[in-house]
Amino acid sequence: MDKFVIRGGTPLLGTIRISGAKNAALPAMAAALLTDEPVVLENIPQVRDIETERRLLAAMGAEVELGYGRAHHRTTICAANLSKNPEASYELVKTMRASSLVLGPLVARVGFARVSMPGGCAIGARPIDLHIKGLEKLGAKIVQEHGYIEARATRLKGARYAFDRITVTGTEDILMAAVLAEGETVLENCAREPEVVDLAALLTKMGAQITGAGTSTIRVKGVEKLGGAKHRIIPDRIEAATFLLAGALTGGDLMLTDCEPEHLTYLLSKLEEVGVKVDAGETTMRVMGDAAPLVGCDMSTEEYPGFPTDAQAQYMVLMTQAQGSSIITENIFENRYMHAQELCRMGANIKVEGRRAIVRGKTPLSGAAVLASDLRASASLVLAALVANDETIIDRVYHIDRGYERIEEKLRSVGAQMKRIGEILPRR
């Protein structure tokens, strides 16, 4: 099992290119199930979840070519010969909750899907009930037994459906089901994330008729058939946020390229309050971490366009190095503070009270052996290690490989003293 070994204290100086968004690529790959023609997706990140999705689609009979390097992070998916009874097995779904996104496309295209229940998640519940309610509203018959969901429909029919609460994957799943449904579907209380907008853009290229993506109400006029398309995945806003915070923490001067600053408007405004200087261009962001002393600032996670929950753990590290106290409130997931205990082992002063975490800074961090519990917790420990004294060893980094492309190579390229276990770090 891989580990990271990191020696902190080095400012990050240089340029990092932001990869494509994993959370946009996964639903886009699932959308390829809606047509028997090839779908070509570009700017696909080279991360573990993408490989899991490839295996999932291949198990259903789709042909998936996944290439990097000269292929420019491109995948070509052709689902012309899907299995008659396609199934998303527990072995695949248990490692990636986004696997449930195949439910809507399969029911819409072939009239049947068998998908394993996603089960528990380290950061909190990710229930699939909103997916089920939405499909039932569109006319699907749902049966749950033996840990699986079976959905059947001759052809889905358009309907009006309001999500009980905002859900990104739920919005994406029902949107994909609705594009082949008979008649018009109106979805209310939808997620407004850029990843939802990107999926709608791909579906539109495939021939879907969608309006309102990026707002709380999406309207879909169902069509008989979708065709192939070529689409470039949007930049990963969470990777960009992580590297922005890394530059700020280390007192560095970091330029991020191939990113989308408009997707991080709330984060950028919060960083300005903290005292971090960021110059944003059209597709670039430059963070100057030594511009001013960091000041503690309260933050609450919210659905887009609010502060993203996926950047909460990384922001917490920033607050450990800011003057004064700050209160972080997690409103999306109920168990997303497991990184706090590991940060305390490194010297942070953090007290968790339910959905609130009180961070008192500025506290010096020191290297320690720490354990990653989930994807974003892993990233927060990497950031903490970059500013800690001495050496930090992070175990279970397979979590970070799920969503960050070659993070150690990117950070090393801008000066970080960071290697995977087994490699020898040069002594300074």
Image (cartoon, rainbow, N blue to C red):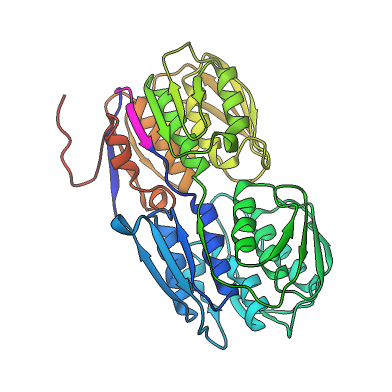
Q: Is residue 11 magenta?
A: yes
Q: Residue at x 29, y 51 (%)?
A: 2
Q: Is residue 302 depicted above or below 61 in this figure? A: above
* Quadrant in which the C terminus appears: top left
The part of the chain drawn in magenta is 10-16
Residue 143 visible, this orientation: yes
Which of the two residues, 215 or 127, is positioned nearer the viewer here? 215
Q: Is residue 278 depicted above or below 133 in this figure? A: above
Relative side of 93 to 246, left or right: right
Relative side of 47 to 119, left or right: left
Which of the two residues, 93 or 196, is positioned nearer the viewer here? 196
Residue farthest along the bottom direction in this orientation:
84
Q: Where residue 346 appears, x then y in whole percent?
A: 39, 29
Q: Is residue 100 depicted above or below 333 in this figure? A: below
Q: Where residue 285 appears, x then y in whole percent?
A: 47, 29
Q: Where residue 289 appears, x then y in whole percent?
A: 43, 19
Q: Where residue 85 appears, x then y in whole percent?
A: 57, 86
Q: Quadrant of residue 291?
A: top left
Q: Is residue 120 depicted above or below 116 in this figure? A: above
Q: Residue at x 30, y 27 (%)?
A: 8
Q: Residue at x 69, y 70 (%)?
A: 177
Q: Residue at x 42, y 33 (%)?
A: 256
Q: Quadrant of residue 266?
A: top right
Residue 149 visible, this orientation: no
* Quadrant in which the N terminus appears: bottom left
How many labels, in total? 0
Which of the two residues, 201 or 195, is positioned nearer the viewer here? 201
Q: Quadrant of residue 383?
A: top left
Residue farthest along the right direction in this orientation:
160
Q: Is residue 118 magenta?
A: no
